[in-house]
Structures are given as structure tokens and as C-alpha cells.
Image (tube, rainbow, N blue to C red):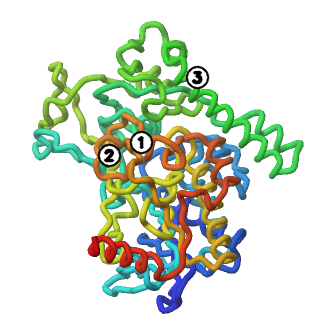
Amino acid sequence: MASSDLDPAQELDVLIVGAGLSGVGAAWHLQDKSPDRSFAILEARDDLGGTWDLFRYPGIRSDSDMFTFGYNFRPWVDGKVFADGLAIRNYVRATADETGITGRIQFGTRVTEISWNTETARWTITAQRGEDIQTWTARFVMMCSGYYRYEAGYMPDFAGMADFKGEIIHPQLWQEDYDYSGKKIVIIGSGATAVTLVPAMAEQAEHVTMLQRSPTYIAARPSRDGMADFMQKVMPTRLAYTLTRVRNVLTGMFFYSLARWQPAMVRKSILKEAKKALGDDFDVETHFSPPYNPWDQRFCMAPDGDFFDVLKDGSASIVTDQIEHFDETGIMLKSGEHLEADLIIPATGLSMQIGGGMDIVVDGKTVHAPDHVTYRGMMLTDIPNVALAFGYTNASWTLKIDLTCERVCRMLNHMGKTGADYAVPEAPSDLETQDLLDFSSGYVQRALPTLPRQGTTAPWKTYQNYIMDMITIRYGKLDDGSLRFGTAGDRARIARTEAFAEAAE
């Protein structure tokens, strides 16, 4: 997509980093709720769409239903519950094109640093565009660059990888024109990516084997929502979308709560459905019974049971074992079994990072994320005028993004009315903290030491609860005693006064 040439000399009210699902959504909310605020979007890639432009592996699709994964302001009318990557990319592009947002995006521009000056209450943003370095100035920054490193996914250092004579391709680096027909394929992993790849590749490959170290909970779900289809026929589009969205939010929250309250019952029900799909002879206990409770990690969905279908018809198989080493023709397992392969796909996860890997500097001091605590899951303590677009782990990502954007617009409007230049969360000194995410997935556990913390009570705790967030973020007081509003220079004056007082003592 051709990039707009925006003017870095213009001082912006808001600079948005990233033109994916979150960044385009943030821009829409700004136009709708804070129309007097100037903004621009800087996108490191050459097109919009973020995740849905980056990932091109076979079968790429959403793992959340599109009625809650879609924006609250733009009905999803495609009909599919789980949309493919192209459909989502087109949905984001149409949203940007039809609302004039595309013209506010500068592509091929990677933000490397943002630096806050309290005296001026402004952010200076440094960005790389080709060989050029650009410098921007903004009052507020919205980080919508996702939660993982785009350059490469997580790749374990398996013994003997260099000995393998076939190809090894991480899904994050997949090329759409790669021909895998007739190949013996081993997919390493058991998460959403692996569960998507297996049925998508089974039709053209000679055989697909999913090799997992431990199982994941996988459940079949219809690819179309009959009730939603019916409502769209007899109701106005927006009303039908809203009702479906509300129903799906409540259903998801109920199931998540049930899984936390009665994990044994939910586990038994999931395994029962898997056995029903695969037959009594299939070893469901070995391959579909994880060592953790439901929703300790994210659930995997199989639209119309496609994953179970290819296991049942023999075009794919599943192996639960550990890797001893790679060799010339495949993978030797610790059990002694050998898996032959022409192509190995390590669907081994993401490498998490905050803010696209940029440096964040506040009054000359580089921010160390673990030293800061989240505020309402959208800001960090002691960092003024920055919002993080970070979605839910137990529900659709976009549900939280929409709420975050609404809250940012409320803050901006409040500052405009009161004459404040900045808003900064300030936590009590005795605040008890804990890990940001209570999730046992490998990519989360690897990243926890590098991530911000969360508190144990509101507003510092991230509850992963849409209804609670909707009430507090959408309708709660802005001046809540934890978010301080101020004007240019006053933080520096306060710091100097406190330092003088300490010196005098």
C-alpha cells in the first residue's frame, strides 16, 4: 500500500504507533469522540493490518468469534464465526479507507524511542523511515503495536537442527507462495497456530503430524452462527450485531467462570466431546488431556471440528512425546519413535515485547517495564500521557481495545476542559504487586520478567473481565485519586521542591 507522507514538523495531539486492528480502532474512536484532536499513525510495515498482514501461513484465522473480535462500532457481516486472515485484513482496511484513516497513516516508519519532557509536557518521538531519522512531537502517545516481536517468533534450539536435510519454517516467516503439496510435514506445537495448520495443510500434504510435548484443550464449534444469521435477516444489521455480541460476551464469561469454578466438570465435558468426534478407539486421554485446568491457557477452537476430521480420516495424526534431536530425515523422539519429515514447522510461539521494542524515556531516564504497574490495564505508573492497547487473554482482544480507546478519549476531553496537560497514574508506595498475567502458556511465562507488574486491587489489578472493565473504564470517575492531572512543568517543580526539602533536612 502506498504510504502517506505526513509532516513530522506538525505537533500532534495524539500519535498512534501501529496500524493494526488496535491502531485503526484507536483512530476511529479519536475521530468520533475527540474530533478536535489532531493525530497520525506510524506503522513499521508497508501495509496496515498488523498481525493479519504479517501472518500468511495456511489456514490463518481468528481464534475468537468475530462478533466480539470485530469492532463495537462496525458490524461484522461476513457471517463466519472464525474469519480467515484475509477477511480480517480486508475488514480493517475497509474501516480505515471508509473513514479517512488510511490517509493519516505513514507506512514503513518504525518508532525507536519516545521521550517525555515534563517542562513542556510533550513527547518527542524518534522514528526510522528507510535511511532517514524523523522526529515527531505529540502530547499523547497510544501504543498499538501489539504484544509480540514481529521480526521473528520464538524458536527453541533443538539439538541437531542443522543436520535436517529438509526445510524448517516458522509460521511467523511463512511465504504464501510456498508449495508444500505431497510433503511429509511435522508441526511442532499444540496451540492455536498448530491446530489451525493441521487441517489446512492435510488436504495437499502427503501426511501431517502434529507433535506436541503436552496436550491442549480443543473444542469444536460451528463456523457459522445460526442465530446470528437469522437475526441479520429479520433485524437491522447494527441491532443484530449488537445482540449477538452481547450474547457471545456473556456466554464466554459464563464458560470461563464455569471453568474456573468447576474445572473437573468442564474438563470431563471437553474430553467427552473429543472422544465423540474421534471414536472410542482414539487415545483421547493421552492426546487431549492437558496437565492444567481449562483456561489456565487459552482455549483452541476447531471450526466445524475440522481438526478432529483430519485425525479421523488419517490424513493427519497427533503424537504426544518429547524431542530427542533432529536428524537428516526428521525428528527422533525420546520414546525412540522417529518421525520422517520433508518440512518441519515449529509452531512454538511468540516472543512478547511491549511497545514494539521501542525505548521509553521519561525526563532523561529510560523506563524499565518491570518497575512499573498497570493502571486499569491501559497505562503504566509514573509514565504520563501514554496508553497501551492490550487486550484480554480470556476473551476477544478487541473488547478491551475498544474500552481503552473510549477511556483515552474521555481523558483527552477532560484535559481539554480543565486545562490539564497530562495524566499520570501514581500508585501508593506500599502497593502489593504480582505478575501481569496469570497464564501458564509458555510465551507468557518466558516474558513475565520483562513485563510490567499489576497490583492486587483496583485500579492496579487487570481483572480480565469485560463487564467489570466496561463499568469502571467507560463510566467510572476519571479523577479517581490514582490518576493525577497536571500542567507543564509542575512535576519538575514538585520534584525540585522535594529534593530541596530532603537536602535541608
Q: What's the residue at 61%, 41% (across, down)?
A: 65
Assess disc 3: are there few (<14), some (14-19) or many (≥20) residues with their C-alpha within 10 Å of its C-alpha.
some
Residue 87, x across and y down, in percent: 60, 54
Q: Which residue is mark 1?
A: 437
Q: Amino acid at mark 1?
A: Leu
Closer to us: 489 or 224: 489
List the single residue furthest toward the bottom. Answer: 9
Residue occupying the point 58% across, 78% down:
39
Q: Amino acid at mark 2?
A: Leu
Name the kind of residue labelled 3 in the image: Leu
Identify the residue position indicated by label 3 in the image: 258
Distance (Cα) linking label 2 and label 1: 8 Å
**Residue identifier under label 2:** 448
For the residues labelled 2 and 3, the Cα–Cα distance comes to 27 Å
Above/below status of 288 relative to 132 = above
In the image, is residue 331 above or below residue 482? Answer: above
Residue most extreme to the top = 280
**Are the residues at dot 2 and dot 1 in contact (C-beta closer than 8 Å)?**
yes
User: What is the x, y in percent for residue 229?
Assistant: 78, 39
Taking 343 as reference, is 95 left or right? right
